[in-house]
Amino acid sequence: MSESPSIPCAYMLIVVASRNPVKVDAVRSAFSAAFDGVTVESLSPPPGLRPQPMSLEETMDGAIARVAWACAGLPGADYCVGIESGVMELDDIWYAATVAAIRSGDGRSAIGIGPAYPLPGRISSLMLSEGIELEEAMDRLYGIADLGEREGAIGLLSKGMSSRLELCTEAVKMALPPFISSGNYRIM
């Protein structure tokens, strides 16, 4: 697969509503693949976010709330980004997925959804019965704390074949096409 050239730009400021180093690195990686001169700033996430989104809609709502917060927190940014990971049930199987929302300085917005992966039944059962987040369920079952700021549940479950950084980066990349290519995109 050939590398696509990045779009020349003297300086581009991107702000992400997260202090999680995985999400910040994902934004930097995705935007640097598309643009030159990228600088990424991070802000604390907005108050009141649901700790564990339990549907695609809740996950999208979280990403949209984060992007709005990022734009309000750094009004001069060229792009604002919100990344939210959540779980959702499809045909009695629980999946984890990441959604990215991007808003440009001129007010255009787009959503990208990264790859989803199935969760083992014992993880989803613990999450549902105890009302806990995926990260806490992983900590309890596997004894590994702070997975969400490192390889993520997917890193452990895939035995290192994938990582949370890769999934977050892909979600951001999936939201970028309306901003980097011509086409008849319906922008939010």
Image (cartoon, rainbow, N blue to C red):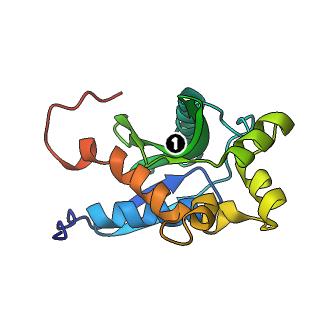
Q: Please name whichever residue, 166 or 30, is drawn nearer the observer in this view of the structure.
A: 166
Residue position for label 1 = 71
- Which quadrant is home to the C terminus? top left
* Rendered residue at 34%/34% (across/down): 108
Mark 1 residue element = helix
Give the percent coordinates (x, y) of residue 27.
Answer: 46, 59
x 78%, y 64%: residue: 142
Answer above or below: position of 21 versus 69.
below
**What is the crowding at mark 1: few (fewer than 14 residues within 10 Å), some, or many (at least 20)?**
many
Position above or below: 149 against 170: below
Q: Residue 48: x and y, percent?
A: 75, 34
- Vertical comparison of 26 with 120: above or below: below
Given residues 34 and 92, the one toward you in this image is 92
Amino acid type indicated by mark 1: Cys
Q: Is residue 2 left or right of residue 166?
A: left
Q: Residue at x 54, y 49 (%)?
A: 74
**Quadrant (top left/top right/bottom left/bottom right) for the N terminus:** bottom left
Q: Position of residue 156 (x, y in %)?
A: 62, 66
Count of marks overlaid on the render: 1
The residue nearer to you, when weighing 58 against 183, is: 58
Tell me, yes or no, if residue 11 can be seen here: no
x then y, percent, for residue 18: 62, 54
Residue located at (65% from left, 33% from top): 54
57 sits left or right of 124 in the view? left
Residue 146 visible in the displayed image? yes
Report the side of 143 relative to 98 (left or right): right
